[in-house]
Image: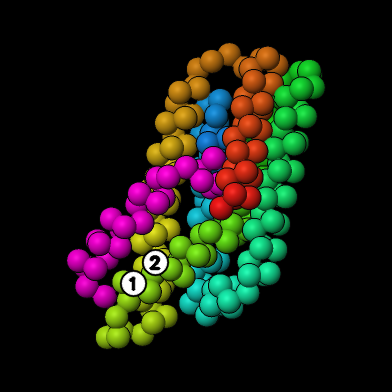
Amino acid sequence: MDTPRLLLFAATVLPLICTPGPDMLFIASQALGGRAGAGLRATAGVCAGYVLHSLLVTLGLAALLAASPLLFAALRWAGVLYLAWLALRLIRSALRPGAANPTQQASPAPFRRGFLTAALNPKGMTVYFAILPQFMHGHDTAAMQALLLSAVFIALCALVYTVLSLVLAWGGRGRAYSDRRRRCVEGVSGGLVAMAAGTLAAS
C-alpha cells in the first residue's frame, strides 16, 4: 500500500479519534488526579481491544456483525451495562468516606477495563467496517491491507490517548492526597464513565 493512501487514511480517522467517546472518557477517568500509570494502562487496554477488532475484521466477522442488528445491539448493550457498573462502583466509593489508600491506584484493573471498554464498543468495529474498505484497492491482499490500516489506526489511538493521559496526570500532579480529594476524583471519574455509557447507549 502506498504512503499517500496511508497518510490520507490517517488524516481521515484522526478527527474521529480526537472526538470524545466511551474510550476517551474512560481513559480520562483513569488519568484524573495525577494517575499517569492508570491512564497509560487504560490506553494499552483500549488499544488491545482495537487489536481484537482488527483481527475480527480481517477474519470477516465484522460483516456478520453488521448483517445482524440483534447481535450488534446485544454487544452494544453489554458495553453499556459494563460501563454503567463501573460508574456505579466509582460513585458509590466517592459517597463513602474513608481513609485514602493510594496503593489501590497501582491495580492492573485499568488495562482489563480498557480492553473490555473497547472490545464491547461495536462503534469501533463499525468504523473499521465502514472506513477501511474505502482505502483498500485490488493490488494487495485484503487481509494485509486491513491489518496495515488497522495498525495505523491503533498507533494514532495510542498516541492521542497517551498524550491525554499524561496531560491530565500532569494537571493533578503534586497535590496532596486526601480522602476529600479521593472522593472528588472518584466522583468525577464515575461521572465520566457514566457519560461514556450514555454515549454508547445513544450511538
The residue lying at 39 percent from left, 69 percent from top is 132
Question: Hey, which quadrant is residue 199 in on the image?
Answer: top right
Question: Above or below — where is 36 with respect to 149?
Answer: above
Residue depicted at 43% across the width and 58% down the height:
154
Question: Image quadrant of residue 104?
Answer: top right
Q: Position of residue 87 (x, y in %)?
A: 69, 38
Within the magenta stretch, is there residue 135? Answer: no
Cα separation, mark 1 vs mark 2, equals 6 Å
Q: Which mark is residue 131?
A: 2
Extreme residue in the left direction: 4
Range shown magenta: 1-25
In the figure, is residue 45 to the left or right of 129? right
Determine contact: label 1, label 2, CB under 8 Å: yes
In this view of the protein, can residue 113 be seen by the observer? no
Q: Secondary structure of the magenta portion, mostly?
A: helix
Instruction: Please give the name of the residue rendered at 41% of the width and 50% of the height, measured from the top-left corner.
Output: 17
Q: Secondary structure at mark 1?
A: helix
Q: Amino acid at mark 1?
A: Gln
